Amino acid sequence: MIVTTDQLFKHAYGKYALGAYNINNAEQTMGLFRGCIESQAPFIIQISKGARSYTDKRMLEAIIRAAAEIFPEAIFAVHLDHGDEQTCYECIASGFFSSVMIDASHDPFAENVAITKRVVAAAHAKGISVEAELGMLGGVEEDIKVEEGNACLTDPAEAEDFIRQTGCDSLACAIGTSHGAFKFKGRQSLHFDVLEKIKARVPGFPLVMHGSSSVPKEEVDRINAAGGTIKDSMGVDVNEYLPAAKLGVTKINIDTDGRLVWTRVHREFFRDKAGEFDFRPPGKIFMAEYAKFIASRNRLLGSAGQLADLRKSLGK
Ligand code: G3H
Ligand code: 13P
Ligand code: ZN
């Protein structure tokens, strides 16, 4: 069942974080739903611009609708990840999205406010909520590469002002993470001090953490042992998810880790079965392994086991 992102946030705020997982194809979607049902967790499906153009945006929507039928127990929202203004308008008009993200964080503050306000007006007119971003994560986002030195943490006073001026419904904050597999050099902790200050200024307001993959060492080691060359990778400590959730982080974005599961499964499969050319056997392994991974993440986020209570609170 597709619900609004607001409904999920209301249930989760301050108690647990919703896993926000990107999807690109049918196998990833099957693994995601299986993992969320197995762990009895609500979740957020994220669709990036790249995912919309990978096959065709209509294909992704059809896959999600099919998954909702195959797994009638599932409760989830559908969200545009890192949208530009035009893509936000397209998704708002489609009638398929629960929420959109407008990412104008690379623009100056006033410009970010102006763009976000326009998207909020269009989205709210259709009952859709808006995630905005303030501060800059390091690493690579779809079209923009932010050098690590240029990444800047969200300023708590600016965050309060930005939320008030834009009317956005949730805010992606830069608290030390970055996208991709190479997040940290040496020090490896979230900036809880910044989070605490933001929460103190906007109590009850849902915050979002991007770049939250943990980049498990054992996963990377297996990839490299099977021919990969992923060096010096480092991710977020999974034991920091729940403490962040208690400080108002209600949505935690995880994508890279799923790509690592895919890479490990396929590298190991074709290393061990060099004569194989049917894509379904590794595809089946991937779906099972991805489901296992998703369930493990939901347990760490605290969203596992929340389905029954959420269903009751939604009156369904
Ligand atoms: O933050 C970006 C997400 O990991 C989605 O990646 O834009 O390559 O689909 P993508
Ligand atoms: P990771 O690259 O850490 O998985 O972050 C994903 C993300 O933030 C999607 O918006
Ligand atoms: Zn992101």
Image (cartoon, helix red, strand yellow):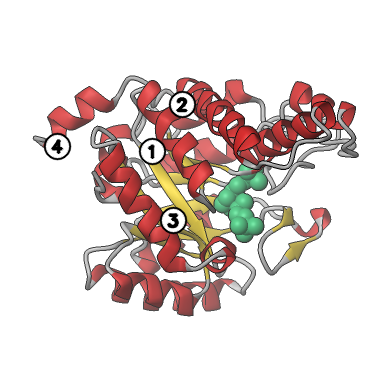
Identify which amino acid the numbered label 3 is placed on: Glu
Please tell me which residue is depicted at 88% across the width and 36% down the height of the picture.
232
Q: Which residue is mark 2?
A: 298
Q: Earlier in the sequence, mark 1 or mark 2?
A: 1
Quadrant in the picture for residue 287: top right
Q: CA distance from mark 2 to mark 3?
A: 29 Å
Give the label, 3 or 4, closer to the camera: 4
Q: CA distance from mark 3 to mark 4?
A: 30 Å
Vertical relation: 43 (above or below) 218: below
Identify which amino acid the numbered label 4 is placed on: Leu
Q: Earlier in the sequence, mark 1 or mark 4?
A: 1
Where in the figure is residue 266, as x and y percent of width and height? 73, 36
Q: Secondary structure at mark 1?
A: strand
Are dots 1 and 2 in contact, CB under 8 Å? yes
Near mark 3 (Cα within 10 A), the count class, few <14, some 14-19 or many ≥20, is some
Vertical relation: 211 (above or below) 136: above
Q: Nearer the viewer, residue 181 or 163?
A: 181
**Farthest residue toward the left?**
315
Q: Which residue is mark 1?
A: 43
Q: Nearer the viewer, residue 62 or 182?
A: 62
Near mark 2 (Cα within 10 A), the count class, few <14, some 14-19 or many ≥20, is many
